[in-house]
Amino acid sequence: MTTLSPSPWPTPQPDGIESPPISNPNPNSTPQTPPSDVLDIPNPNSTNSDNLSPPNLLHVTFNQDYGCFSSGTDRGFRIYNCDPFRELFRRDFDTGGGIGIVEMLFRCNILALVGGGADPQYPINKVMIWDDHQSRCIGELTFRSEVRGVRLRRDSIVVVLEKKVLVYNFADLKLLHQIETFENPKGLCEVSQGSGSFVMVCFGLRKGEVRVEHYLTKRTKFVMAHDSRIACLKLSQDGTLLATASTKGTLVRIFNTYDGTLLQEVRRGVDRAEIYSLAFSSTAQWLAVSSDKGTVHVFSLKTNSVNEGTDNLDNNINPKLAVTSPGSPLSFIKGVLPKYFNSEWSVAQFRLIEGSQYIVAFGHQKNTVVILGLDGSFYRCKFDPATNGEMTQLEYHNFLKPEEAF
């Protein structure tokens, strides 16, 4: 069950009034988004703690268009611009301070916050809607269990619990949809960002199953993506493509979200790995993958050809896949050798520190990748699709230590 309660307001609200509209006096319309450059100037009221030791990083994620990223620390949260790299503003709280989840809404002043760490600023079972223009929370959603993830659209808030996903209207915080799921401790869930469609992907009720919700057409599609548990998933910006990886971490599969067709299968490696993040390029021409092996891979996508291998398990031989797998010099031996000899391999790689956790996204400059680490590292790299091989590092910063970043 979910309860909604408004955060404190100067004037008490009458009984029966739920959380007030977010940045919009009209509850029947979506919240008004401030101009795109609203975060480009550092906030003069932000707390400056450069004289202190670097905070402990609890969370890092990109915004919806990958132009910014946010970090939650044991003191508060910070917002950064990706290109050019710079800190835009920070909020360090006087008491408590731990923020375990920070979700931006593009570049506007509205954020979703969830407490975290040893001394959380807010209860871990609440989603706080923060308005940085007012420097306070203007609404909250309260649950009976820990919040595992939050995703934002201009019209919706999606909250992920251990075995449940809830969709709210952003204008008035009214509950629109509630879905029971397979256990989901990592809070995996993705939403499309195109204005003409609303696609959400979350766990189904079975291990390895993905549920695809097409809200505008009121269609639900179930996809058995893997025979083992799902470790990571990602939607393309328009919601037409879905990438998934299992806990085996060897293969990544790309599906058509409309009919569930398996379009392509690419191989990260042969040995097991934990996949930390997946990312489509804006044109869905490329897919990036980061894992605990300390390597970011970029794959070329060929989503115009439908793959027939949907019912095969992760490491079975599938001769049909070998026909369209140019990545291996042994691909002429179709169906004879194990499948990994005939797999589609990455066109570019970048080596990082093995064991550290990194997330990846494509930069706004052509053929560039941005990598964020939970150690505070920021990398910008460039790959050459014509030559394949190692990416070139263009930039590095430690975003927890501003003196090293500028």
Image (cartoon, helix red, strand yellow):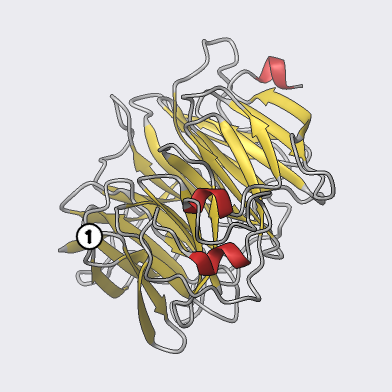
Q: Quadrant of residue 280?
A: bottom right
User: Is residue 262 rendered to the left or right of residue 329?
Assistant: left
Residue on which disc 1 sits: 182
Q: Is residue 20 visible?
A: no
Give amino acid for label 1: Phe
Residue visible at 49% across and 25% down?
356
Residue visible at 45% across and 89% down?
217
77 to 180, vertically: above or below: above
Residue 30: x percent and y percent?
Answer: 51, 74
234 to 89, vertically: above or below: below
Q: Is residue 327 visible?
A: yes
User: Is residue 159 rendered to the left or right of residue 87?
Assistant: left
Residue 1: x percent and y percent?
Answer: 15, 63
User: Residue 177 versus residue 133: which sits nearer the camera?
Assistant: 177
Q: Residues within 10 Å of mark 1 (few under 14, many from 20)?
A: some
Label 1 SS? loop
Residue sticking out furthest to the right: 386
Quick one: quadrant of the C terminus? Answer: top right
Residue 372: x percent and y percent?
Answer: 59, 34
